[in-house]
Image: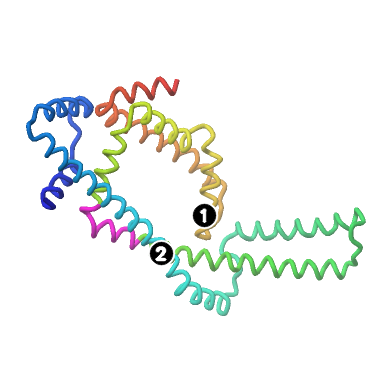
C-alpha cells in the first residue's frame, strides 16, 4: 500500500500539462470512474494518497521554514552576538558602516538641537549655553551607541542569514522527493480552485506587487532590506529597482497566464479579464 501511494504521488508531482484542458480531462476521467466497478476502492485509495500528500506537504513546509529560522536565531544568540560584540566594541574604531547611517545620525542630532532652541525661544525651558552643550554631548554619545549597535547587528544579520540560506538549500537538495510532493500539492490546490477564486487571487497579487500603488510598498521593503544588511540606502538604486523589477514581475505573471493557465483553465482567464476590466 505504501509503495503504491508513493508511486501515485510521484506521478502527480511530475504531471505535465497537455493539449486538452485539465477540467475537460477530469470530466472524462470522472465519467470513466463512475462506470468502473472498482470505483469505490480506487476512490478510497485516491483519498489515502491525497491525505498522505497533504500531511507530507505540511510537515515539509514546517521543516523548511522553521529550521532555518531557528538556526538563524540560535546562531545569532549563542555564537554571533558575543563574538561580534567583542570584536566590534574592542577592536573597531568605526561607528558607521555606510554614509546613510551618518546622514540619519546627523539629522537626528540636528533635530534634537533645534528642539532645545525651540523650547528656549518659547520659554518652556531656561538653560545656559553650557547646559545645551552638555545635553548635545550626551545625545551624541547616545546616538553613537545606537548606530554602533546597528552596525554590529548588520554584520550579525549577514552571517546569520547566510547560515539560514545554506540550511534552506540543503533541505531542498536532500529532500527532493518531499519537494516534489509539495509542488504537486500546491499545483493541485491552485488549479483546483474555482475560476472566480483564481481570477481574484491573480488580481490581488498583481495589484499588490505590480499595481499603481505598489512603488510605495517596494520602497519601504527595499529600505528595510538595505538597513537589515547594513547597506547604503541609495535613492538612485531604490528608484531604478522600483522602475524595473515590478515590470519584470508583471511580465512573468502575464507569461504564466498565457503559457499555462490559458491552456489549463481558459474559463479562469476569461473570468480574470472580465473582473479586471
Residue displayed at 44% across by 23% down: 276
Main secondary structure along the magenta-highlighted residues: helix
Left/right of residue 79 with respect to residue 94 in the rendered view: left
Determine whether 29 is above or below 100 in the image: above
Q: Is residue 169 magenta?
A: yes
Per the rendered image, the range of residues in magenta is 166-178
Please state which of the two labelled residues, at mark 1 or mark 2, is closer to the viewer.
2
Determine whether 170 is above or below 191 in the image: below
Q: Position of residue 49 (x, y in %)?
A: 19, 45
The residue tagged with tag 2: helix, strand or loop?
helix
Q: Position of residue 266 (x, y in %)?
A: 29, 23
The disc label shown at residue 92, or none: none
Determine whether 272 is above or below 133 in the image: above
Q: Which residue bears the numbered disc 1?
A: 226
Residue displayed at 31% across by 58% down: 169
Left/right of residue 122 with respect to residue 64 in the rendered view: right
Amino acid at each position: 500500500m505504501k509503495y503504491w501511494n508513493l508511486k501515485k504521488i510521484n506521478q502527480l508531482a511530475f504531471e505535465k500539462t497537455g493539449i486538452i484542458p485539465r477540467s475537460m480531462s477530469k470530466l472524462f476521467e470522472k465519467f470513466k470512474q463512475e462506470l468502473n466497478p472498482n470505483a469505490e476502492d480506487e476512490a478510497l485509495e485516491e483519498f489515502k494518497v491525497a491525505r498522505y500528500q497533504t500531511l507530507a506537504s505540511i510537515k515539509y513546509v514546517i521543516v523548511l521554514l522553521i529550521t532555518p529560522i531557528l538556526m538563524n536565531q540560535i546562531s545569532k544568540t549563542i555564537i554571533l552576538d558575543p563574538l561580534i560584540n567583542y570584536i566590534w566594541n574592542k577592536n573597531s574604531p568605526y561607528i558607521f558602516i555606510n554614509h546613510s547611517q551618518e546622514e540619519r545620525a546627523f539629522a537626528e542630532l540636528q533635530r534634537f538641537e533645534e528642539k532645545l532652541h525651540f523650547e528656549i525661544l518659547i520659554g518652556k525651558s531656561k538653560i545656559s549655553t553650557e547646559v545645551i552643550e552638555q545635553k548635545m554631548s550626551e545625545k551624541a554619545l547616545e546616538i553613537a551607541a545606537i548606530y554602533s549597535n546597528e552596525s554590529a547587528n548588520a554584520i550579525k544579520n549577514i552571517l546569520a542569514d547566510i547560515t539560514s540560506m545554506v540550511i534552506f538549500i540543503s533541505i531542498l537538495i536532500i529532500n527532493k522527493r518531499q519537494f516534489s510532493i509539495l509542488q504537486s500539492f500546491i499545483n493541485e490546490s491552485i488549479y483546483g480552485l474555482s475560476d472566480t477564486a483564481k481570477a481574484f487571487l491573480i488580481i490581488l497579487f498583481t495589484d499588490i506587487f505590480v499595481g499603481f500603488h505598489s512603488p510605495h510598498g517596494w520602497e519601504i521593503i527595499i529600505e528595510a532590506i538595505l538597513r537589515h544588511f547594513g547597506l547604503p540606502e541609495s535613492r538612485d538604486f531604490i528608484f531604478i529597482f522600483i522602475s524595473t523589477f515590478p515590470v519584470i514581475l508583471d511580465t512573468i505573471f502575464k507569461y504564466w497566464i498565457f503559457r499555462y493557465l490559458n491552456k489549463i483553465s481558459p474559463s479562469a482567464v476569461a473570468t480574470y479579464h472580465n473582473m479586471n476590466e
